[in-house]
Image (cartoon, helix red, strand yellow):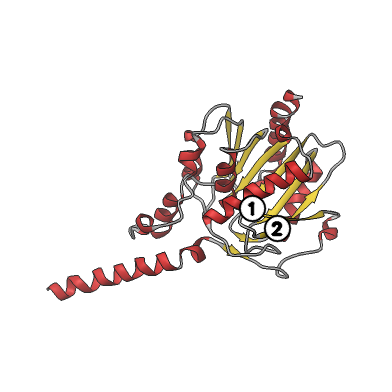
Amino acid sequence: MMHFVAVPIALIALFLFLVRMVENKLVFFPATYPEGFWQPQQYALQPTDAFFEASDGVKLHGWYFEQENSIATLLIFHGNAGNISHRLHFIAQLKAHLPVNVFIFDYRGYGKSEGSPSESGLYLDARAAYAYLTETLRCASHEIILHGRSLGGAIAIDLAREVDAGGLLLESTFSRGNDMAREMFKFMPVWWLSKIKLDSQAKIAAIDLPLLMFHGRRDRVVPFHLGQKLFEAANEPKQFIEIPKAGHNDVYVVGETEFFPAIQIFLEQTIAGKE
């Protein structure tokens, strides 16, 4: 009898140990250069390459897309997979619909950026990107909108606690890494051993920036209720927009008629109102 009990316990313990060992690989799925679509001219885009360093010496790469008569600059924190070249269609749509400059960069280990991804490392990368935007490109802090999608939402929220910005724009993101682990592994207590916290729910309560959130009701990657949970923890002023037929990656496509006009109004209220 003891044998029949001990074997399942041992297997569960082994499983949890292995998860802990490969945790980063379960969260981060980088595509390194030359994988991707590195010809932005196919989307009629002409970015300026940005090369900069995180505080621990890791060299990073990003793209800056300038637009005439812009009223704001979006600092984009992309999701956990691919690299910046996979976001060209989204950037083209942003520039077509909104009067904004766009700065998007790759975290360590993604695209042309050096190093390997980790939670603490991505936070350093975010600070380096903000510093490049404000110190090298001389963007006014009150004209910067921190825009995080999925995993990038957690990175944007962490940065928003420490820097000045015009507002916070979140898309398809979650409350905490532990909540995501519970959704993924159900009854296996992976969340209990996890080193990766991504605790946006706790952090967002300390942020007073205007907030605009989007989430697809049919999101099968980040459940809709985790987006709601995060929103409930946020301070006013805030707005949550549900896109009923959207999944995880198509919010701006399926919800185009709501997505871009809502951001336009958000910019006018948060940026233009401060000038």
Residue 239: quadrant of the picture:
top right
Residue found 86% across the figure and 54% down from its top = 44
- The answer, for residue 247, to whether it is visible in the render is no
Q: Is residue 87 left or right of residue 213?
A: right
Q: In which quarter of the image is residue 106?
A: bottom right
**Crowding at label 1, few (<14), some or many (≥20) Cα neighbours within 10 Å?**
many
Secondary element at image label 2: helix
Q: Which residue is drawn at 56% across and 52% down?
A: 151
Q: Which amino acid does label 1 sit on?
A: His
Q: Where is residue 158 in the image (x, y as percent from the top left)?
A: 55, 43
Please determine whether, in this image, residue 115 is positioned above or below residue 241.
below
Instruction: Quickly name the residue at label 1.
Output: 78
Taking the image as drawn, is residue 144 in sight?
yes
Closer to the N terminus: mark 1 or mark 2? 1
Residue 252: horizontal and vertical position, in percent?
A: 68, 46
x then y, percent, for residue 119? 52, 55
Check contact, mark 1 vs mark 2: CB within 8 A. Answer: yes
Please tell me which residue is depicted at 77% across the width and 24% down the height of the picture.
275
Neighbour tally class for label 2: few under 14, some 14-19, many 20 plus, Cα within 10 Å: many
Of all residues, the one furthest to the left in this rendering is 1
Q: Cα distance, mark 1 to mark 2?
A: 7 Å
For badge 2, the amino acid type reads: Ile
Residue that label 2 marks = 84
Within the image, what quadrant is residue 4 found in? Answer: bottom left
Q: Is residue 209 above or below residue 127?
A: above
Quadrant containing the N terminus in the rendered view: bottom left
The secondary element bearing badge 1 is classed as loop
